[in-house]
């Protein structure tokens, strides 16, 4: 059977099927444990641009985290120590004040 399918594909027998070149509807997106009504409601919400609050919060947290990491890197490059043991008393004080300001 597989050989026959491959042979037909090689001849181009499947080239004129309806929907050729169009994306498939994602049947795998349907959760079999969710009833049809809930599935359709979710589909309508998604298609109209609804984004759950927890996703928006996660995005906001990612942005804030990246900003904090960037600030720490920039500040670290302005100080003269390479490792914690190389820190002068002045560097330690500046670093502690900076960390406290981030809190």
Image (tube, rainbow, N blue to C red):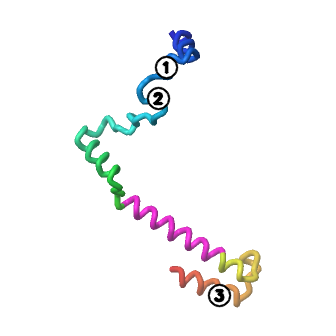
Residue 83, placed above or below residue 94: above
- Residue 63, image x, y percentages: 51, 67
The answer to the question of whether label 1 and label 2 lie on touching residues, with beta carbons closer than 8 A, is yes
Residue at which label 3 appears? 94
Q: Is residue 61 magenta?
A: yes
Q: Is residue 1 left or right of residue 92?
A: left
- Give the distance between the C-alpha atoms of the residues marked 3 and 1, in whole angstroms: 71 Å
Q: Nearer the viewer, residue 77 or 11?
A: 11
Q: Quadrant of residue 87?
A: bottom right
Question: Which residue is rendered at x = 54% and y = 18% of the image?
Answer: 12
Q: Residues within 10 Å of mark 1 (few under 14, many from 20)?
A: few
Q: Is residue 30 left or right of residue 17?
A: left
Label 3: element kind: helix
Question: Which residue is rendered at x = 51% and y = 80% of the image?
Answer: 103
Label drawn at residue 20: 2
- Residue 47, image x, y percentages: 34, 49
The answer to the question of whether label 3 and label 1 lie on touching residues, with beta carbons closer than 8 A, is no
- Give the distance between the C-alpha atoms of the residues marked 1 and 2, in whole angstroms: 9 Å
Label 2: element kind: loop
Label 1: element kind: loop
* Mark earlier in primary sequence (3, 2): 2
- Residue 85, image x, y percentages: 75, 78
Look at discs 3 and 2 and give the one toward the viewer: 2
Looking at the image, the residue that sits furthest to the bottom is 90
Look at discs 3 and 1 and give the one toward the viewer: 1
């Amino acid at each position: 059977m597989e050989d026959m399918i491959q042979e037909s594909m090689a001849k181009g027998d499947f080239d004129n099927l309806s929907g050729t070149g169009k994306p498939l509807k994602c049947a795998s997106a349907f959760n079999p444990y969710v009833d049809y009504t809930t599935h359709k409601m979710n589909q309508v919400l998604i298609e109209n641009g609804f984004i759950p609050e927890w996703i928006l919060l996660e995005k906001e947290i990612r942005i804030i985290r990246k900003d904090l990491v960037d600030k720490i890197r920039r500040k670290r490059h302005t100080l003269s120590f390479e490792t914690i043991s190389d820190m002068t008393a002045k560097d330690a004080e500046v670093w502690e004040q900076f960390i406290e300001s981030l809190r």
